[in-house]
Amino acid sequence: MKEQMKKIQEELDQDIINTKSLKEVADLKVKYFGKKGLVTELTSNMKELSIEERKEVGKLSNEIRTYVTEKLSTIEKELELEELNKKLEKDTIDISLPSDKIKKGSRHPFNRIIEDVEDFFVSMGYDVVDGPEVETDENCFQRLNVPLGHPARDAQDTFYIDSDYLLRTQTSSVQARTMQKNQEKTPIRMICPGKVYRRDDDATHSHQFGQVEGLVIDKNVSLADLKGTLELFAKKMLGENTKVRFRPSFFPFTEPSVEVDVSCFKCGGKGCSLCKQTGWIEVLGAGMVHPNVLRMGGYDPEVWTGFAFGTGLDRFAMFRYAIPDIRYLYTNDIRFLEQFDRKDEENEIK
Amino acid sequence: MKLSRKFLSDYIDLDVDTKQLAEDMTSIGNEYDSCSKLIPATNLVIGEVLECIPHPDSDHLHVCKVNVGKETLQIVCGAPNVRKGLKVIVALVGAELPDGTIKKGMIRGQESNGMLCAMSELGLEHKFLKEEDFTGIHELSQDAPIGEDPISYLKLDDEVIDFELTSNRGDLLSILGMAYEIGALYNKKVKEIDLSFQENQEDINTQFSLEIQTENCPLFLAKKVKNVVIKESPDFIKNRLIASGIRPINNVVDISNYVMLETGQPLHYYDSNRLGNQIIVRMAKDHEKLTTLDGQERLLSDQDIVIATEKEAVGLAGVMGGLTTEIEEDTKDIIIEAAIFHPTLIRKTSKKILRSEASTRFEKGLDPKRTYMAIERSCHLLEKYADATIVGGMVEYNQIDTSEKEIKITLEKINQVLGITLDKETVIDIFKRLGFSVIEKEQIIVTVPTRRTDISIAEDLIEEVGRIYGIDHIEGKQMILPVVPGKVNKNNRQIRNKLAMLGLNETLSYALIPETEVKKYTTDQFEMIKVLDPMSEDRNTLRHSLLPSLISIYEYNKARGNKDICIYEIGKSFGKVDDCYQEANHLAILMTGTYTLGLHPKKVDFYIIKGILEELLDYLGYQNRYSLQVQDLPSELHPGQSASIILNDTKIGILGKIHPSVMKDDAYVLEMDLEKLFSFRTKAMQYKEISKFPGIIKDVAFVVDQKTPASELIKWIKKEGGKLLKNISIFDVYEGDKIEKNERSIAFSLVFEDATRTLNEEEVMEIFNRIIATVENKLNARIRDK
């Protein structure tokens, strides 16, 4: 018996050296553990043995069974690993080849700016109001203290549709609308972004462009409040370090009126070509709502004060995305549009 | 407004440099465009030509020895008038002239250390130059001091600030107005203007009559002077005019301009003998003609004011005088006119005919006190510089209120509006600096001089305080207001985000398009909205459909070789309906070329744009509420590949292929009225129970007539499927050899499910068979491969 076992062991060792594939491992399993397998054979004559002998043979055959099983299992694992590695090797791809493209879409810079402006003012409790682009002369001019024949109409060459209607030259028209619409004459905080039209077309002007108007009416509103508000707005749109400067100016619908400059975001105020060496860029017109405008809107100027401001949206888009020419915004070359396909950074102008 | 520093200095003493003055004026609201020297050239000296010999290698050049004081320079000169003994303007080596820097050099072998200058080379505007200023070097008079600055010698050493004034500050279109403003800025007194002159014993009123026939001329003054001597103006007058941008002509004409610049009151001088002894101010007749000073014949209307004699119009009031009564070399006697005309009418006339220095001032409104002052100043200067005899008396028509305005204000109001805390003394001091008189009672009572036509209410005074105090000194405050959340409609934003994710690019185009495009791509009934005065025929009407804009964007890109154009825009659609101007936000999409989303690039077809529509409407919350119907389609769309979009029985838009006769390229478009769309409310997103029980899937392929739309099959399948039919999908559409020619096979996969229990095969089969029977029956269909 022991001799037989030794023979099996030796044969197995030799077999394992010659084994090169999992198929051969399977064959060996049959050779040793099959019905007529070498290990199986060892216990084939158990019935003929005495109890003592059975115990002896049983013990020895278990030993050899364990031995063979372990050996076969080891070689099987080795071969399996080898095969897996071969498969991985075979499956290796060139990751530098191009991806399956997913078409990119974009949102226009003009509307991106509007969304930012809206989000900022909504966070400050302002409502975003929409107004018609075909507007009455009354709302666009007369209710803003610009009567017929007023020289301020010259600066805004107007597209008229008939004697009463025009394409709005300024989003300020929404001021007049909002005041009239507010029947209860409660405080107002609103902005109105939108398109405006002027008979004017050159390198720096487009006959259609964007503006946003802001209006606050409340009790005891001051020019200092206006400045504080615009400081926050400028920082949001142009960066944390932006400073705001007020210069007196004239608009028929505000008194006092101011032009608002922001420190040049490009040079930080040192002077560069963008700010024409002044360190400042004019971005807004603003002021305290003229008592005539309040009165026409149904607000008693003895009780209420307010401020209003207006700014061009196209310029902010040009600043933020470093667009050199306003006309690019309206040309719609797909190579231009496709560039605006990602998320915006906060305070992107650096 | 060009402000000459020298001119200004006649009325106020300045101790700041000109650039600083410009900056300081800007800070109080008077922006400047430029600030520069009248003659920008540098490094010039007066020299004397000591020797002038012809250049050995040239037929026109001369080699000169020029004494410039410290030294004698050799300079080669090409001017025909260069000669020995001439006093000349020498640009030394290093001089900066408008055409470049002067360098030491060799000219045809002869050393040249500078340049002898013509007036045209120094940077003065051409309109101020005479012919000889271009043809030869400038000849200075013999007393010119060698080695000195020729610009100072010529009294052209002036500096000019060009202001861009706001439209309310007409008062600053005068040297005096500027002096008062700068006086307030630096707290300085304005000097008196000399208005003295002698009158003779005559009285103009006995010789001359005035008739004002229109209410548009509230003030008219006329004064006569005699025996003027027409000659060249003294240098100071010429130079101040040049610095102010006005070309000198002769002493009389120059004085009228000079006084206008000083006082802001435009004047007109008539040749009295040509005019006659009468002036009528009236509105022009329609189609009346007048030849103005510049020789042009002008066609007038009844909106223009004219100055006339009984015979004819002799001047266009406020804009330009007429040719027939012009001051000429032989003029002896003059009628001086100073008047105020209706600003709006002058603005209209000048806009139509001609913008002049005079009209610019009339348009802004004038100070009646200056009207009188301008007459007196004219007399003073004409007496002094044109040897005039001043005729006594003045013809006068005055309907204007010349009293000064009184405005009441409180310190509290000023501080409240500006958001600062000034004390009373500071505020009163500011008013006094501005030349306003102040009475202190409970309120501050401010009397404003008539020159400040822009000030009429308390808020105007608040602005004055803010300006002079320094509006930028106001510190920004953080407002404390009740916390009320702001409202914003984000619908359009949601659409933009979704479409960008679906690979479309957003455009921004003009609302004004050619009239011929406006009725396209729509079946809506509306009148076009045209602008009265378009800039071009390409932009004369407001668009109704946005698609013509997108199509021109497509063509623009195609011309540049850009492919695969998939674009969208949200914008207003305009139209006049029932006499009302209406506008509504529209969404328009155009897709061409190939479209890639996921693995397979695909040529854009109807089903892709339909997919975009469904993706979008589902995303916006309108699942299962819309359908496509082939009805009411614009003729610009392919009749077999387009549809109307119907939501709750309302047409909200169209989609489809552009008709091949309209566009050769395959292009697919969509347009939706967003106001209509969003007028249908959507339900909040809510969780639905997921079935724990497995569904049963049944596949079936129907063969139907080619023309039967899939939507018909779906309709009947849904109807018979009932509640248990959870999902229908089409997985194959077949036309070909295996079925009849005019047939089509559509294969469906149907999912049956009940969230509360497991369905058994028998009940599903019963429904399935019913579906098959109904579809076969209703649509004349048969099951494929049966």
Image (cartoon, coloured by chain):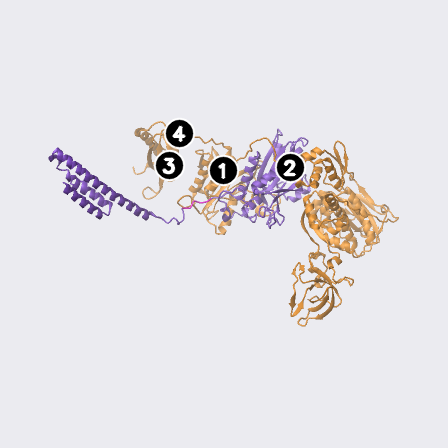
Question: Which quarter of the figure has residue B396?
Answer: top right
Q: Are marks 3 and 4 on the same chain?
A: yes
Q: Nearer the viewer, residue A350 or B714?
A: A350
Q: In terms of secondary structure, where does tag 4 sit?
A: loop
Question: Which quarter of the figure has residue A227?
Answer: top right
Residue B595 percent location from the top left of the image: 43, 45
Within 10 Å of disc 3 (Cα), the crowding (few <14, some 14-19, many 20+) is: few
Are the residues at dot 4 and dot 1 in contact (C-beta closer than 8 Å)? no
Q: Are marks 1 and 2 on the same chain?
A: no
Mark 1 or 3, nearer chain start: 1
Residue wearing tag 1:
B494
The chain carrying label 1 is B
Chain drawn purple, letter?
A
Gap between marks 4 and 1, in whole Å?
Answer: 27 Å
Within 10 Å of disc 1 (Cα), the crowding (few <14, some 14-19, many 20+) is: some
- Left or right of A193 on screen, residue A2: left
Mark 3 or 4, nearer chain start: 4
Within 10 Å of disc 4 (Cα), the crowding (few <14, some 14-19, many 20+) is: few
Q: Colour of chain B?
A: orange
Residue wearing tag 3:
B729
Task: Tell me the tag on residue A224.
Answer: 2
Q: In terms of secondary structure, where does tag 3 sit?
A: strand
Residue A164 percent location from the top left of the image: 63, 38
Q: In terms of secondary structure, where does tag 1 sit?
A: helix
Mark 4 or 1, nearer chain start: 1
Residue B321 visible in rendering: no
Are the residues at dot 3 and dot 2 in contact (C-beta closer than 8 Å)? no
**Rendered residue at 77%/53% (across/down):** B254
Gap between marks 3 and 2, in whole Å?
Answer: 64 Å
Part of the protein shown in magenta: A100-104
